[in-house]
Amino acid sequence: MKRPSLYFTDEHELFRQSVRQFIRSEVVPHTDEWETNRRIPAAVFRRMGELGFLGLPFAEPYGGANADFWFSVVFLEELARCGMGGFTTAVSVHEYMAINHIAKAGSEALKQKYLVPAIAGEKIAALAITEPDAGSDVAAIRTMARREGDVYIVNGAKTFISNGTYGDFVTLAVKTAPAGGPNGVSLIVVDLNSPGVSRTKLNKMGWHSSDTAEIRFDEVRVPVENLIGTEHAGFYYLMESLQLERLVAAVMAVSGADLALDWTLTYLQEREAFGKPIGKFQAIRHKIADVATEIDVARQFVYHTCWLFTQGEVVVKECSMAKLHASEMQKRVIDSCLQFFGGYGYIEEYPICRAYRDARVGTIAGGTSEIMREIIAKIVVDAVAYKPAYS
Ligand SMILES: Cc1cc2nc3c(=O)[nH]c(=O)nc-3n(C[C@H](O)[C@H](O)[C@H](O)COP(=O)(O)OP(=O)(O)OC[C@H]3O[C@@H](n4cnc5c(N)ncnc54)[C@H](O)[C@@H]3O)c2cc1C
């Protein structure tokens, strides 16, 4: 029997069924191909655009659905149930990390040029903050955008950029005032086919279907109109959007852990040892009870944080806690689940093997666990207060 929910209506659940159907029929069957090719075909983004999946939070005039945040939660949960961290990353970076800056603070011209085709799935977007010498310390980025008349001239390098190899454009964090520290950062949109942009695909431990690039910018000319919002306000835009980014990561981590538990429950019934299904052994049953408890407890905190987010609250502390807890939990849970597959858990044909590799990066990308603890400690110990950056 369906249980009541504080958060999801029948409409959300109907939407869940349509996303689940899409994932089952148009994503999961291609897992091996996309993981092997280390690439998601552009046609899949177009298909998701047609289905309206890429514009859930955005305004209708740009092709969006203007749907409440719980539709996004449903979408992200179902996305993660494809069991392919790379696909989940490629789509979530595009929709919830790269283009939301344009939607929030971009000019009308930028929205028409980049947001509209991104929502339609005709252009694929990346977000580039991390550099070879600056990851956690965002204010230390060195990629420069020097203004010359109507253009910025961009020089520098970014690394670990999801959708960076095959993407069409990037929301790029640059320094527009070299001495300004956090006050010298701006966000600009750069076409990735511009002269002077070169990209190198990186070979990763997991998230294979997601392409990840190092991108170099050598005297790249970018129109000044491609500035997002106010010059030098980029650091604060990024910090605010990281709340959403971390919440998205937390939602997907819980769902990914839940999927691993489902695979494991099936396997426990199928696999026999000492004349009975291994799911009958108390040692395993108790561990499964721990795993199920961990997932459900994490899910409720993540939902609560989502709810605070929908109320327009500044949820830096809760989003950081959600990302920290859910990504660490996902790693622990998948490790435990893999154990019950015995040797088969170590074999590539079993999805739990891929899930184990994919989960490893959850405590690194989008802000490491150490940085989450730093943020939480600043709020809890030092009583630092964060204010909204977009107005
Ligand atoms: C597969 C993948 C995809 C990614 N996708 C993107 C993307 O699309 N766009 C993008 O911009 N970035 C992306 N990243 C980058 C990711 O966000 C960074 O790797 C992450 O923020 C950490 O930065 P770093 O790798 O430079 O590590 P560093 O900042 O060099 O940190 C190294 C270690 O030191 C620790 N550390 C650093 N500072 C502190 C401190 N103050 N206190 C305690 N410990 C500290 C860190 O936690 C870490 O353990 C991706 C990374 C990966 C692996």
Image: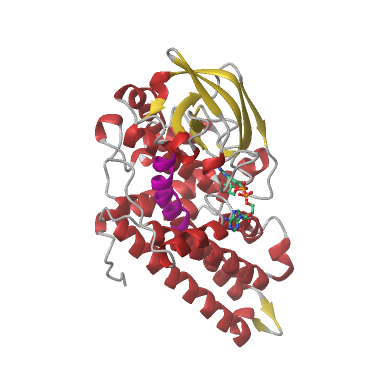
Up the image or down, 204 lies above or below 195; here it is below
Q: In x, y percent, where is residue 328?
A: 55, 64
Q: Which residues are magenta?
A: 235-250
Q: Residue at x 25, y 59 (%)?
A: 9
Give coordinates of residue 138: x percent, y percent: 53, 43
Q: Position of residue 107 (x, y in %)?
A: 32, 26
Query: Quick check: 28 left or right of 115?
Result: right
Extreme front residue here?
179
286 part of magenta stretch? no
Q: Is residue 19 above or below residue 328?
A: above
Residue 119, quarter of the rendered image = top left
Residue 244 in magenta? Answer: yes
- Residue drawn at (58%, 16%) of the image: 195
Residue displayed at 60% across by 31% down: 165
Residue 286 vertical placement versus 69 (above, below): below
Q: How is the image coloured?
A: secondary structure
Q: Which is nearer the eye, 365 or 46?
A: 365
Quadrant for the N terminus in the image: bottom left
Q: Nearer the viewer, residue 250 or 181?
A: 181
Name the main secondary structure of what is drawn in magenta. Answer: helix
Quadrant assignment for the C terminus: top left
- The image shows residue 158, relative to residue 332, as above or below, that is above
Q: Quadrant of residue 378?
A: bottom left
- 230 vs 33, nearest the viewer: 230
Residue 360 percent across, percent down from the top left: 62, 57
Question: On the rendered structure, is 195 left or right of 59?
Answer: right
Q: Residue at x 38, y 22 (%)?
A: 113
